[in-house]
Image: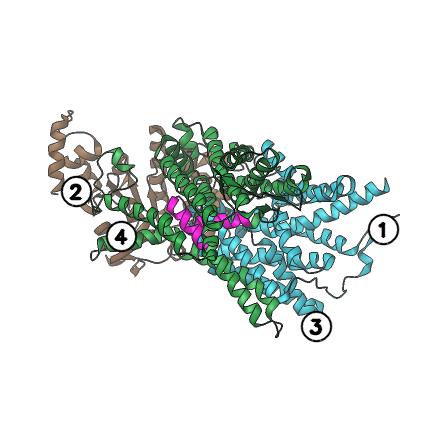
Chain colours: A cyan, B brown, C green
Amino acid sequence: MEFFLQLLVNGISLGFLYALSALGFVMIFKSSSVLNFAHGELLAIGAFLFLVLSSWANLPIIVAFAFTLIGSFSLGFIIERFFLRRLIGEALIEVIMLTVGLSIMFKGLLLFIFGGDIHNYRQFLPEGLSITWGSIGIPSVYVASFIIGILFLILFGFFFKYSSQGIYMRSVADNQPAALSLGVHVRRVFALSWAIAALVCAMSGIVLGIINGVNVHELSSIGLKVFPVVILGGLDSIGGAIIGGIIIGLLETFTGGYISTSLREVIPYIVLVLILMVKPYGLFGLVEIERV
Amino acid sequence: MENNIRLLLNNISVVYSDVIQVLKGVSLTVKKGQIVSLLGSNGAGKTTTLKAISGLLKPENGKVTDGSIEYDGAPVQNSSPEEITRKGIIQVLEGRQEFKYLTIEENLRVGTATRWGKPYKKDLELVYHYFPALLSRKKNMAGYCSGGELQMLVMGRGLMAQPKLLLLDEPSLGLAPILVKEIFQIIRRVNEELGTTLMLVEQNANMALQIAHYGYVMENGKIVMESDANDLRENPDVKEFYLGTAASGALKSYKDVKSYKRRKRWL
Amino acid sequence: MRKLQFHPCGNFRQTYREEITIFETDFGRMWVLIGIVLLFAVIPFISSAYMVYILNTIGIYAIAAIGLNLLIGYTGQISLGHGAFFGVGAYAGAVLATKTGLPFVLAVPAAGLVTAAVGMVFGVPSARLKHLYLCIATLAGQFILEYVFVQWEGLTGGAEGISVIGTTLFGIDLGNDRVFYFVIFGCLVVMTWIAVNLIRTRFGRAFIAIRDNDRAAEGMGIPIFRYKLLSFAISSFYAGFAGALYAFYMISITPEPFNLWLSIEFIAMIIIGGLGSIPGSVLGAVFIVSLNEILSNITQYLMNVGTSSGVAITIAPLREFVFGLVIILFILFEPKGLAEVWRIVRSNFRLWPFSY
């Protein structure tokens, strides 16, 4: 029973991490319908930027954090400006391959600079955040990720549902020519959403880095793990991403705990295929409205 | 006299992808507070004319290569749609380009993009006043609305931007005659009550000429005829080709129509 | 004798038959013949052993790329699982040859059929899924198949893999690269011919209709699900066929090569070659394989140079960097691919000096 509870807690914590790393992905998808295969690399870039600033340059944590966010924000902006903007209106497969190309490129660059080793941040989270129930413990990083996750969920929910800029973003994702005809600054919307997404990615990357250490391979493979998470939740729903993340997290820890560790890596994908067969737009995704 | 002119197209040519010339020297004038309608068959270049004005040629790889477009006395040709819409020209696209996944009200709110951050509640009320059908469905997703509601929606969305010049591209497309009549009445009311200048591209020449003050007829990228709407309605050629009633009122045989066609080319 | 026809300067086609001809002119037919003669009678005899190895790799990948182009470029169904399908073909070929003793001639097409069946299973989601969701479903297929390769040890030999030794075709030993060259390129020519002709049939037209608008295609009376499945089956058949050739050519196979990276390389091939172009797929395979070889040669060279200075180890990731950059540059600056470049070059010659 204790084993079960520990797995449950581990699964939910892991799920929150997945959900947190999926937020940036959903953000980009929601505004520009781009499936970002370079997501894992964006996480990694954020994590490494923070590593360089905090541990190597020895800046105070808050300053390093602020600079990391600014840096990632600009990076997202640059990616949109120089790569994706040229592909506005092109076929899906080309946009996908562009992000694949970006992911390969960034990964190569990161490996070139930092190598394949695991790096560690210095300790800075207060220990007081951790929770213990009898024998089951939740480390403070997980608690922090939980808080950040909930905060973002609420923030983004309000942003997309009620703020004008959020509605403009959704309108661009929905029907670009129409948005353009109404004077929505489409390019600004894209740039902004990439920039915000990169910022969120950096934040998730840092949290992941605190837990597992900063490693190029590890972080970029999380970029692929994001797919089952967001598909389960429905590609454009942030609340769905959180639930999808928890489902995947639980699946992984329970499969790993009770069945076999090798199955653990594929089980999300198997479940994903099964769910897509039953609910083609994920559990909480928008049903595509099609008119011929 | 001079400042009475809202929009002036001076001999413009439009070329797509550097090879396909669509407009060959189009000139037209839209006076403040008027409804000007632009008639013509498919492929005559009406939509292109509107897109040249609203700046939407750019994303389609089109360009105004010659001539000038003056809006309130300032040149606007080849500006980006963001700039043009902010000056008060809003185009309502052909074929009801609604935002499917947004509710009706959110759709309308997108119309405020040109003046982001300013209050919009009054405009919403105004739009619901003109299009009461939208009010009852304001929380519905636009993708599930009927064609008539959508046409009202996209026109209302255009009004949300408080345009000085509203370009309407085929508002009657695919609507039942009774809805067409309703829509055109609303267009006239908007023009009379809000003083919005309107430019109307239509296949339904009959309806368009009933509410318009002035009309242009386009063919093969050129303006072939222009006149007061009343005069156009009486013109035998327009009657024959666009209103579908022959001068005598009787149906003509196909052979005669063909001979007219030949004559029309020389216009 | 008929007069040799040259390319007309405009579209003068008057019948549907003319519209779907492969060669508009006898000139084009002649060039293809010259190409085939060069391919079989000249190139294998003047190339070095290393060149033959590269050409063989190109030939195998080209077959798979043609198949993938039928699926993505013509039917519009994105598959991120073709690397795994290629692997299914390789394993099927190897298992059939080692466990059941099927001869090479039968084992390769049989492996293609097995893969077609697997491809159809993973094509089933296409009944309800479109675009991104299908793309992700095939990505999931990729990971599931990779898992099967490693875990089904009884059949695939797990991480150790399988080795196929002593393949013969009609009594000829295929252990020699140069001999295998003829097998591979013979298959490539036949498979290309089939693909080009398939596009001209009602099936091909149905595929294109589904790509352009599947709802409208359905309205026109095309049973879209059946055709999508068919497209998956044909495409995986090509992948499996190529995979089986790969298994016999490489002699021993392990699960590693058939990963997501291979799927991405296949898509890169058809994008760089040109979506919806059969010759483009071949060009794309040539480009990607050559690029890979050139990059690995350069890194190897730099490693040898820099062994003493210690920079050597860190240079290897730059290979990935360049590869990614090339894909990006192609998509940004020549999105229609090499096939389009070739067409522009050709029409420049044809229409010179009046460009339109």
Residue A42: x and y in percent read 59, 57
- Label 2 vs label 4: CA separation? 22 Å
Q: Tag 2: residue type?
A: Lys
Distance in Å between CA atoms under marks 4 and 3: 61 Å
Amino acid at the residue labelled 3: Asn
Residue holding disc 4: C347
Dominant secondary structure, magenta: helix
Chain under label 1? A
Q: Is residue C280 magenta?
A: yes
Residue at mark 2: C3
Residue A135 in sight in this render: yes
Q: Which residues are magenta?
A: C262-288
Q: Residue furthest front?
A: C171
The residues bearing labels 4 and 1 have C-alpha atoms spaced at a distance of: 74 Å
**Residue position marked by numbered label 3 in the rendering:** A58
Q: Earlier in the sequence, mark 2 or mark 4?
A: 2
Q: Which residue is denoted by mark 1 in the rendering?
A: A132
